Amino acid sequence: MTAYSLTQCASWRALERHRARIESTTLRSLFDEDDKRAERFTVDAAGLHCDFSKQRINQETLRLLMDLARERDVVGHAQAMFRGEHINRTEDRAVLHVALRAPRGEKIMVDGLDAVAQVHDMLDRMARFCNAVRDGEWRGHGGKPVRNVVNIGIGGSDLGPVMAYEALRHYSRRDMCFRFVSNVDGADLLEATRGLDAGETLFIVCSKSFGTLETLTNARAARQWCVQQLGDERAVARHFVAVSANEKKVRDFGIDVQNMFALWDWVGGRYSMDSAIGLSTMLAIGPTQFAQMLAGFHAMDEHFRDTPAERNLPIIMGLLAIWNNNFLRSSTVAVLPYADDLKRFPAYLQQLTMESNGKHVTLDGAPVGYDTGPIYWGEPGTNGQHSFYQLLHQGTRAVPCDFIGFARPIHPLGRQHDILMASLIAQAEALAFGKTADQVRAEGTPKTLVPHRTCLGNRPSTVVLAEQLTPHTLGSLVALYEHSVFTQGAVWGIDSFDQWGVELGKQLATQVIDEVTDEREPALAHDGSTNALIRHYRALRGARP
Ligand code: F6P
């Protein structure tokens, strides 16, 4: 579909007309008008309780958004994904992360092969390997068991693994040490290997393409570190495993393909934390808990696939994102987990949402005539409350917020969890209802301070509550966002599964690397600023402090 057809859709135009009605009202009056609002706008799915009653909507908004989903055939697009059709059109690929968590015995055919059977063969291999490492049967070159695991990868080959490790640390083997290296800045690898005994260290080189500059550079440096410490090239076979879709490149790098765990081109990097890319997660929490995480993903997949749009949580969440983005003109979304173990969740979501939906043309290649993916950002609560929440409450832009919290703590400690959750609930209330000038005056506030202390409210948020942060909950939560991103992409008519925009920077960097390091100082043919920066860098790089 083209840009023209989206903004000309009857439902889109109806939503534009409807916007005025919503903009002229407030959350305060919407709640006053409807005492069933909280129940009406709450959905439970796959262990998640999601209250979106503090979004700036009424029943009519939701009805029109549902019309939009129908007009854009979101359900039809989802069915095409589940059938293994090549919905990633620009790369001519199926998009089948849902097959990664389908139960054994289910069948999803992709290009003539049963994806689910392939997945379970790989999960079995991963489980055998992880058990061998965890039980101390897999020995390092010098005969020592593995105590340290270092995952080397970037983007989807890092953010999922590190986020899941942090989130599920409580369920992990505490006698093992897990570290994650992504940045090509040498500081990252040096710090990650600091103090480690190479004889007890296993490196997982995670790269779907096995062609990513940062990952291969770090992997080479890690190999050198390992061989230097152990004094034998043959050590690589016991200390390096690879996760990749590119067997040839793994072999060329010098890792035995016996030590390679595969994924497939129908798994996008940012949708891969539950594939073999999650090997570090399985090593940390063990195959049984990993299976529970997959079950959480699958529960949300089934909900997404089988539930009518009106009660379908990812569809509702995706449509609300569109409502806020395209109609209420909010260009960012804050993700605020009230769980310290989810501290990397916003960073994980940034790739999932922004690499997926940061697109400027439709599937046909026509310029979109509307805004696509908003900027996602965030920090855990309550930390954020003491830094950027001021802008959320009184800034000039409304920032829709996703609050995420859990009823039961992982670490019961005095009243701490109740304080944490009370803060979440209070923040959502404060954003929605604010504090009127009358309320401020009634507190005896001096007249001049009344405007400063007034909070206008009317700032939208969604609250996602679950019983506890478990592997299962994490799976459901990630799948919720995956399918919400899918819904948004389907409405916008874009390819949510390619990422051509990241290529240009990579290409230019390859050229600039030569230019900054070539001693012959080659002539430069960039723009004036780039040329000057390269020259300045070359001069400083050569200079001694
Ligand atoms: O540069 C972007 C990207 O291609 C991401 O899409 C991907 O997750 C990341 O790089 C890493 O890619 P790979 O797993 O192939 O090393």
Image: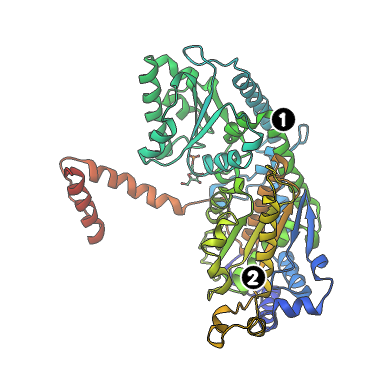
x and y, in percent, of residue 153 in the image? 48, 37
> Which secondary structure lies at badge 2?
helix
Q: Residue furthest top?
A: 143
> Which three-letter amino acid code belongs to the residue tagged 1?
Thr
The residue under label 2 is 431
The answer to whether residue 510 of the structure is visible from this angle is yes
Are the residues flagged by discs 1 and 2 in contact, CB closer than 8 Å? no
Residue 199 to residue 189: above or below: above
Q: Nearer the viewer, residue 544 or 531?
A: 544
The residue under label 1 is 288
Q: Quadrant where the C terminus lies?
A: top left
Left of 389 or right of it: where is 298?
Answer: right
Q: Earlier in the sequence, mark 1 or mark 2?
A: 1
> Which three-letter amino acid code belongs to the residue tagged 2?
Leu
x and y, in percent, of residue 446 in the image? 56, 85
Residue 257 to residue 74: above or below: above
Give the foreground label among 1 and 2: 2
Marks counted in the figure total 2
x and y, in percent, of residue 214 in the image? 40, 39
